[in-house]
């Protein structure tokens, strides 16, 4: 057997092994829901929302009480998370009169599997969930906010940067740039950046189909025109708070606000520790969506609300 043929086979095997190792190493672990809104005493609907590539998203819709259609918040979890992990922020939003849609991204929670997931695919799922919510009779399509955590935060920033029908955005613990996040991940795995890490980054860009510079939060923030709140924990070691400062510095306008709070990357998950911060988040959204509502044409503002019966039971809606 010729030496060149042996080298070709060896190179092919190495490439296949490299691709397999990268995809397996970066794939999120699917975590089942441990709770539902019912555990918080909230009525909800289970909904299934079509998304890209003929996949379906699993989601919970917690309708508002009282006047509907109501202002709404679409909530996206982080990498390896699910809708249940975002439940701690829901009671305050519900008490403030919001309808809340919590979604599982593809490859997460109870949503469909796909060949891979990524920040742009999180944003795709947000786009499809937003389109569904805009048609939902419980939600006012002119008063919808996006809330995301970690990769989900980067995704809501990316989604909002490409559209003008979002009333407000809240980013919880977003990284500034995918390369910064990947470099920390590779260092944690003791993978040298040169040449292996560099090759991983180029391969991931190829698979995702986007340049990291184009989808980075430091890029997205400059294109967002609606009120935006960047929230970050001062003790976050997963994504240092300096990255929130970088995102804030890249803004164009005074509609983007930065709030550094006590806590780490996932401390938002304990409502006892962040009760005051949830109140601040809810106040920001309420004020932003109130201003959006006041901007409606008079005839639409006067006719948009109607009293709906209180929802007490779980329903399944497709």
Image (cartoon, helix red, strand yellow):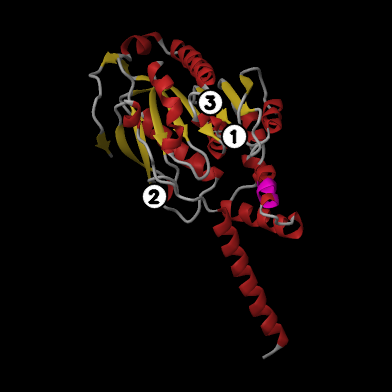
Which label's residue is closer to the chain start, 2 or 1? Answer: 2
User: Does the image show residue 97?
Assistant: no
Judge left or right: residue 129 versus residue 148: left
Position of residue 287 relative to residue 14, above or below, is above
Q: Secondary structure at mark 2?
A: loop
Q: Quadrant of residue 8?
A: bottom right
Where does residue 82 sit, x and y in percent of width and height? 44, 40
Q: Nearer the viewer, residue 259 or 226?
A: 259
State left or right for residue 41 relative to residue 91: left
Q: Which residues are magenta?
A: 182-187
In the image, residue 286 sits, relative to residue 137, either above or below, namely above
Q: Position of residue 178 (x, y in %)?
A: 65, 43
Q: Is residue 262 magenta?
A: no
Residue shown at the point (52%, 32%) measured from the top left: 148
What's the mark number on residue 112? Answer: 2
Q: Is residue 5 above or below residue 264?
A: below
Is 309 placed left or right of 110 in the picture? left
Per the image, the residue denoted by label 3 is 169
Q: CA distance from mark 2 to mark 1?
A: 27 Å
Q: Main secondary structure of the magenta part?
A: helix
Element at badge 1?
A: loop
Q: Report x, y in % for residue 241.
A: 68, 31
Q: Position of residue 246 (x, y in %)?
A: 71, 30
Q: In the rendered view of the protein, which quadrant contains the N terminus?
A: bottom right
Picture quadrant of residue 197: bottom right
The reply to whether the magenta stretch includes residue 183 is yes
Residue at the disc numbered 1: 265
Neighbours of disc 3 within 10 Å: few (<14), some (14-19), many (20+): many
Question: Circle 3 — which element?
Answer: strand
- Residue 50, quarter of the rendered image: top left
């Amino acid at each position: 057997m010729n030496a060149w043929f042996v080298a070709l086979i060896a190179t092919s095997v190495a490439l296949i092994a490299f691709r397999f190792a990268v995809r397996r190493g970066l794939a999120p672990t699917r975590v089942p829901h441990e709770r539902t809104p019912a555990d918080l005493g909230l009525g909800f609907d289970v909904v299934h929302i079509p998304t890209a590539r003929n996949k379906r998203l699993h989601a919970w819709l917690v309708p508002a009480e009282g006047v509907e259609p109501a202002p709404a918040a679409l909530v996206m979890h982080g990498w390896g998370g699910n809708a249940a992990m975002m439940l701690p922020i829901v009671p305050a939003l519900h008490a403030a009169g919001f309808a809340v849609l919590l979604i599982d991204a593809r490859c997460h929670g109870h949503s469909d599997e796909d060949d891979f997931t990524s920040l742009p695919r999180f944003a795709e799922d947000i786009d499809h969930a937003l389109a569904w919510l805009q048609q939902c009779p419980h939600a006012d399509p002119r008063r919808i906010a996006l809330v995301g955590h970690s990769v989900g935060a980067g995704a809501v920033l990316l989604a909002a940067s490409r559209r003008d029908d979002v009333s407000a955005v809240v980013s919880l613990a977003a990284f500034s740039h995918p390369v910064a996040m990947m470099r920390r991940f590779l260092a944690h795995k003791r993978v040298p950046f040169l040449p292996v890490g560099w090759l991983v980054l180029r391969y991931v860009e190829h698979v995702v189909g986007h340049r990291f510079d184009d989808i980075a939060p430091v890029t997205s923030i400059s294109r967002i025109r609606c009120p935006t709140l960047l929230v970050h924990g001062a003790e976050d070691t997963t994504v240092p708070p300096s990255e929130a400062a970088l995102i804030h510095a890249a803004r164009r306008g005074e509609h983007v606000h930065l709030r550094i709070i006590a806590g780490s990357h996932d401390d938002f998950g304990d409502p006892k520790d962040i009760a005051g911060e949830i109140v601040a988040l809810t106040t920001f959204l309420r004020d932003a969506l109130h201003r959006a509502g006041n901007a409606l044409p008079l005839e639409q503002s006067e006719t948009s609300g109607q009293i709906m019966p209180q929802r007490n039971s779980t329903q399944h809606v497709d």
